[in-house]
Amino acid sequence: MKNVKITVMKTACYKDLMEKYENPLPHPCDMREGQTFTAYGGVKPDGFCDSAWESILPFVETLSQGGGNFYDGWMKNEKSAMISCNDGFRPVSFLLEAEDK
């Protein structure tokens, strides 16, 4: 299986939505732009957000098994994907890239 590099590309924070709809969280997202993780053999990296992992897992699994070319040419690099987590208050965009061994 291939390793998959996960790079935090963008983070957003919608305070207006948080104030209106969200209950305060003791530990909100702490991802930082430029932060990188590696999924070795499709396994969730230590310290990686559980919720974000659920969002990217199908793409990590496909890339780690040598697949790619999602949605018939969506990405310029067919062995990559740009996926956002499912947090509507503070979404994070991740670049996933299969690494050559």
Image: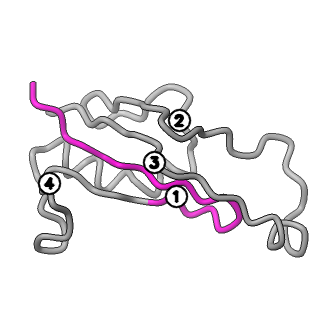
Seen from the viewer's position, the closer of residues 8 and 46 is 8
Q: Is residue 91 magenta?
A: yes
**What SS does tag 4 mark?**
loop
- Residue at 90% across, 68% down: 19
Q: Residues within 10 Å of mark 1 (few under 14, many from 20)?
A: some
Q: Earlier in the sequence, mark 1 or mark 4?
A: 4
**Spot occupied by residue 46 in the image (x, y as percentages of width and height):** 50, 25
Question: What label sits on residue 9 in the rendered view?
Answer: 3
Front tag of 1 and 3: 3
**Spot occupied by residue 27 in the image (x, y as percentages of width and height):** 79, 40
The residue that disc 2 covers is 48
Q: What whole-number distance in Å separates the C-alpha atoms at marks 3 and 2?
A: 15 Å
- Mark 1 near mark 4, Cβ–Cβ under 8 Å? no
Kindly identify the amino acid type of the residue bearing the numbered disc 3: Met
Q: Quadrant of residue 86?
A: bottom right
Q: What whole-number distance in Å separates the C-alpha atoms at marks 4 and 3?
A: 16 Å
Residue 2 to residue 86: above or below: above
Front tag of 2 and 4: 4
- Mark 1 near mark 2, Cβ–Cβ under 8 Å? no
Q: What whole-number distance in Å separates the C-alpha atoms at marks 1 and 2?
A: 12 Å
The quadrant of the picture occupied by the C terminus is top left
Seen from the viewer's position, the closer of residues 46 and 75 is 75
